[in-house]
Each structure stands twice: as structure tokens, then as C-alpha cells.
Image: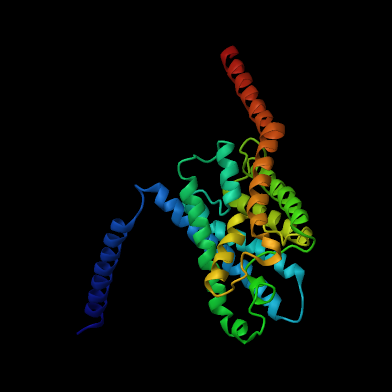
């Protein structure tokens, strides 16, 4: 058999293989089901978010060298990498608080909100289990099988009490939501979507680096609640009772903060920018009529 005939048969087999793959892909493609596609995007994006985010927290916990800069940078990269998946599949939110706030502001339809939030929590849950799988040997060897010990890898915690943590989360998430709204506002600086995710990642780096003290910079109910559920399922019985039942703070605080941030942005920025854009369009229309 000549080399040419072998190459011809190889190309023929490869073509059949590729045709088979494309046929299966056509059957699996979710083009007609945007809600399912968006939920999958949120699920996968939050897995990536927690895998890298809690992963660096685990490294920080087991490493004698404490490096806050690497933690904040990695959380920013975790957001960026998560958005690369979730943003192309659907809405690219990865945060129940921002999901609710954007629905209130009319930027996200209300119908998919419950499923999006469940997908985000489920993704954070799985992401935490993956972190546990990678660091299992370190965790098992540790004598501190409590939320004050190795359980702190998965969740945030207060340092000055629940009220201080609540205030921290309300203000921090309000800032996060308002600035995300500014970045994504097409009437503002018209930032391309592919660049917007980099700015959002830098925003998260800044917030985590500047305000980690009182509440661990949760800024996201799913980021704490999903891994907290994972910790409970892994045997941390005090997952929800630790720190005087602190678990509600990273849920309520970010939701209130996101709603405040979204409303304030629309009130003081968004409606005015849209008004200016409408006024410019009217002026252009008048000029064209005069011509």
C-alpha cells in the first residue's frame, strides 16, 4: 500500500469521525433553549470562581507565608475566568445579589432569575467540593475539623461581629453593583463586552484587597452559601452555627447592597446618560431634516 493511499484512507476516516462528532453536537446543542444554556453557563462559571477563589484561600491556610496580595489577585482572576464561560453562555452574572438587582433595574428578565440563582449556588457547591478533593490530604491530616479550623477555607467569617460584617457587605456590594453597572452601561464609556470583564475583575481585586477585614469580602451570597453547604455535607457540623450564626450576613448583606447600588446608579447616572443619548439622537435627527 502506497503512502498516498494510506493518507487518503486516514483523511476519509477523519472526515467520517468529524461528521459523527458534528451530528452529535447538533443533537446536544441548546440553541433553542437559551434558559438552559444560561443556567449551564452560571453553573460552570461559579465552579471556576470557587475552584480558584477558595483554592487560593486553602493555600493561604496551609502555607506559613501569608500573602494577601496573591489572594486578592487570584479572586480577581477567578471572576475573570468564570466570566469567560458564563458570559458567553448567558448573562455572565455568577452572583445572586447582582442577578436580583439587575432584574429590579430591568437589565435581566425576571423569569429566569430563580433558576439562575439555583445554578449559581450549585456551581459554588461543586467548586468547593473540588477544592476539598484537591486539598483533602492536608485537610484530613489537620486536627482542626471545625469551621474555625479547616472549614474557614470554604466560607467567609467576621472579625468584629455580625453587625459590622453586615454593614461591610452592604456597602461593598453596593459599590460592586454600581460600578459593574457603570462598566456595562452602553451609554457611559461604551466599553466592549470583552474588555468589560477585565474591568470587573480589576474591581473585584480592588474590593478584596481593600476591604477583607470585617467580612472576608464575600460580596456574593452564592460564594458563601454554596461552599457552606458543601462544608456541612463534608462533616463540618458547625457550618451554619459558627460565629453566632453568621451565615445569614453574606446572604442578606450583599442582596441589600446590590439593590441599593443598582438603584443609586440608575437614579444618579443611568437615567441621565440615557437622556443625554436620546437628546443627541434627537439633535442628529433635526440636523438630518434640515439638510
Seen from the viewer's position, the closer of residues 273 and 291 is 273
Instruction: Write the residue at 63% across / 19% down.
Output: 283
Along the viewing direction, whichever of 159 and 54 lies nearer the viewer: 159
Q: Is residue 135 above or below residue 33?
A: below
Give the total number of marks visible in the rendering. 0
Q: Position of residue 54 (x, y in %)?
A: 62, 69
Q: Residue furthest top?
A: 290
Reply above or below: 36 against 158.
above
Note whether 120 is above or below 14 in the view shown: above
Across and down, in percent, residue 114 comes to 48, 48
Query: Who is closer to the viewer here, 284 or 270?
Result: 270
Residue name at image x 77 percent, y 58 percent? 211
Q: Position of residue 192 (x, y in %)?
A: 59, 46
**Residue furthest bottom as drawn:** 141
Note whether residue 198 is visible: no
User: Is 171 on the left or on the right of 222, as rendered?
Assistant: right
Examine the rendering and report whether any part of residue 17 can be seen.
Answer: yes
* Residue ID at (44%, 57%): 40
Amino acid at each position: 500500500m502506497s503512502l498516498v493511499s494510506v493518507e487518503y484512507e486516514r483523511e476519509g476516516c477523519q472526515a467520517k469521525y468529524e461528521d459523527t462528532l458534528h451530528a452529535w453536537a447538533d443533537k446536544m446543542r441548546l440553541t433553542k433553549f437559551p434558559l438552559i444554556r444560561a443556567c449551564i453557563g452560571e453553573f460552570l462559571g461559579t465552579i471556576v470562581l470557587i475552584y480558584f477563589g477558595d483554592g487560593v484561600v486553602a493555600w493561604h491556610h496551609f502555607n506559613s507565608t501569608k500573602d494577601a496580595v496573591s489572594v486578592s489577585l487570584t479572586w480577581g482572576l477567578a471572576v475573570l475566568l468564570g466570566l469567560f464561560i458564563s458570559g458567553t453562555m448567558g448573562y455572565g452574572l455568577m452572583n445572586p445579589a447582582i442577578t436580583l438587582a439587575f432584574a429590579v433595574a430591568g437589565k435581566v428578565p425576571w423569569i429566569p432569575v430563580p433558576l439562575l440563582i439555583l445554578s449559581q449556588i450549585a456551581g459554588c457547591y461543586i467548586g468547593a467540593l473540588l477544592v476539598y478533593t484537591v486539598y483533602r490530604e492536608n485537610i484530613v491530616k489537620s486536627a482542626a475539623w471545625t469551621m474555625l479550623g479547616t472549614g474557614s477555607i470554604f466560607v467567609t467569617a467576621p472579625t468584629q461581629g455580625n453587625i459590622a460584617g453586615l454593614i461591610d457587605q452592604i456597602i461593598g456590594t453596593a459599590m460592586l453593583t454600581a460600578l459593574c453597572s457603570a462598566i456595562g452601561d452602553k451609554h457611559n464609556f461604551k466599553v466592549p463586552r470583552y474588555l468589560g470583564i477585565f474591568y470587573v475583575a480589576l474591581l473585584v481585586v480592588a474590593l478584596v484587597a481593600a476591604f477583607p477585614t470585617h467580612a472576608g469580602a464575600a460580596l456574593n451570597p452564592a460564594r458563601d452559601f454554596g461552599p457552606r453547604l458543601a462544608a456541612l455535607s463534608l462533616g463540618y457540623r458547625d457550618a451554619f452555627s459558627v460565629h453566632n450564626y453568621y451565615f445569614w450576613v453574606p446572604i442578606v448583606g450583599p442582596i441589600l447592597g446590590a439593590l441599593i447600588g443598582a438603584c443609586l446608579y440608575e437614579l444618579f447616572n443611568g437615567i441621565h446618560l440615557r437622556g443625554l443619548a436620546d437628546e443627541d439622537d434627537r439633535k442628529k435627527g433635526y440636523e438630518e431634516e434640515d439638510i
